[in-house]
Image (tube, rainbow, N blue to C red):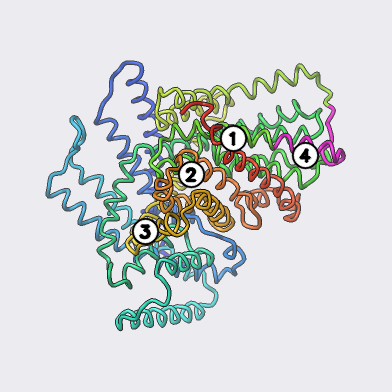
Amino acid sequence: MQISYILDRFSKYAGFIAAVLVVLLSLLVAYDAGMRYLFSEGSIALQEVEWHLFDIIFLLGLSYALKHDKHVRVDIFFERYSHDTKAIVQILSMLLLVIPFSLLFVSDAFDMTWQSYLQHEVSPDPGGLGSRWVIKAFLVAAFVLLILQAVSEILKAYHQLQDKKNLWRILGIVTLLGAMVYLAWFNRMAFWFDPVFLMFAMALVLLMLGFQVAFVFGAVALFFALITDEMGLHVLEMLPYRTYGIMGNVTLMAVPLFIFMGLILEKSKMAENLLMSMGQLFGSVRGGLAISVVLVGAILAASTGIVGASVVMMSLIALPLMLKHNYSPALASGSIAASGTLGQLIPPSIVLIVLGDQMHLSVGDLFKAAVVPGLLLIVLYILYILVFAFVRKEAAPAIVSEESYGKVAKAAFKAILPPLLLIGAVLGSIFAGIASPTESAAIGVLGAMGLAAMNRVLGFDLIHYASIETVKLTAMIFMILIGATAFSLVFNELGGGDMALTFFTGEMGDKWAFILIAMLVIFLLGFFIDFIEIAFVVVPILVPIVASFHIDPIWFAILIAMNLQASFLTPPFGFALFYLKGAAGDKVSTGAIYRGVVPFILLQVVALGIIVVFPELIYLFGK
């Protein structure tokens, strides 16, 4: 355990450095945007410093996120495991997934870095930074830290095991299976099934067992590269170069900045003030509290975009109030869960940023296109609540306030105005083409700090919390992207992309059949895995098919985003349901939550159908 403690310190310091750089990156991007737009002065070197800081943030965060168990896993079965079983899964994950994949990555990344050093590689842009090998060396350092942290996790999990014999039995079985696979490969036995299907099957099984998502994709890619003769490990030699391409993607720099902005707002008491004010404003209407939850969810979506935070905040604040006033537990929980997931669709949405990157689309165009579908969902939610309250008056009663309505309206206006101004500044600058999403996100960070200062909660503790959590979430997202990139490299080398393209354009040959199947597959996958895995693994397979059918990619991306939002609500594994139940405790039953979200899922399907039938709606705010 002493060794584990020492190894943990490396990750701890790496995470702390990354957290400091999150704050510095926000200030630098905001400064750079201000200088460029106000004084027409820009610096190539400063812009490269910004994306170097972005790279270091998520690379140093990889081991820190592992230390805090922030690398997401599908916990359908994992949460029911015994303490020993969880420890065994953790040991197997580190031994069989993290360490082998990281060792391969370190080897290839070192070759790339060494080549850059020998060639004295510098920035191709005039005025850019020199010694390009330095930032590439962080790839090596990041995965070395990941290996060290994996060793620490093995030591900690082994120390916690009550019965160590089970671990050794399972390791013996794994060794036996490995020997059988090796013998089959050595004797050049043919695959019983197409390896493309086997890749997906193996990944799905490991995900269901509770192994971390990012490492599953990377390790499965490594396994099939090893056992497939026509490929070998050389197919993954391009992975560090692909990762370096991710590092240089300025669009993705908006991800940590929007997360940082949202986390500051989460702790600024903005949501609490909004909910209380809006609840009083609409309380006199039947279903008014539920309507206020929807509207506050929309405002939080447009300002924070963090689904988990929105659902938990409203569960803690609004749910007790609604139950106190005799609201139906199903309606209360359904409206909270559905409203909390609006951040998946309403800009500035992390989902849309990821989809823009994966589908090679303008994030600004996606933000514009998502406005009408987001408003459509809000309207449908409110109409449903009004109809429900009219039919079942006792389940959504009106609340009589002793205060004058004018005073309530004034308080609500004061609570709503600051976040609306922030939303207008962030999204307005993007829609008007004044600033990029990354620049707008940095300005949004400053605005969020201003709102926190107004509420007298801005301080070191808040910035520390927001920056540390930003590092964890950003590292989790980008580790999944790296693992998904490795998976895609092997998948395409096996002919999976060509197989999908041939099936839809040749054997099927119908655009609408493709759209229907694609939406159905994404919807069903949403029952089991998170939107990030779907966006990074499934979407790249669909992109060439979308192009071959000449489907509007912006429209198709919005359909995917709406579909992914539904994945947060679909019982029994929707993440929003877990967030809600975890925050609500015994206040509502799981059955009431499931009954409550079903109508909202159907409303999402209706909204999806409207956008399918009337695709021109997404361009009401311009192309």
Which one is closest to the eye, mark 1 or mark 2?
1
The magenta stretch is: 381-400
- In the rendered image, the quadrant that contains the N terminus is bottom left
Label 1 sits on a secondary structure element that is: helix
Badge 3 is on which residue? 498
Q: Residue 126's spot in the image, x, y percent?
A: 18, 30
Instruction: Measure the alpha-carbon separation of dots 2 and 4.
Output: 30 Å
Give the mark, 4 or 3, whose residue is nearer the N terminus: 4
Q: Residue 264's spot in the image, x, y percent?
A: 52, 34
Give the mark, 4 or 1, whose residue is nearer the N terminus: 4
Badge 2 is on which residue? 469
Q: Residues within 10 Å of mark 1 (few under 14, many from 20)?
A: many
Foreground residue, 600 or 608?
608
Instruction: Measure the alpha-carbon separation of dots 1 and 2.
Output: 27 Å
Instruction: Measure the alpha-carbon separation of dots 4 and 1.
Output: 25 Å
Residue 382 is inside the magenta segment: yes
Mark number displayed over residue 322: 4
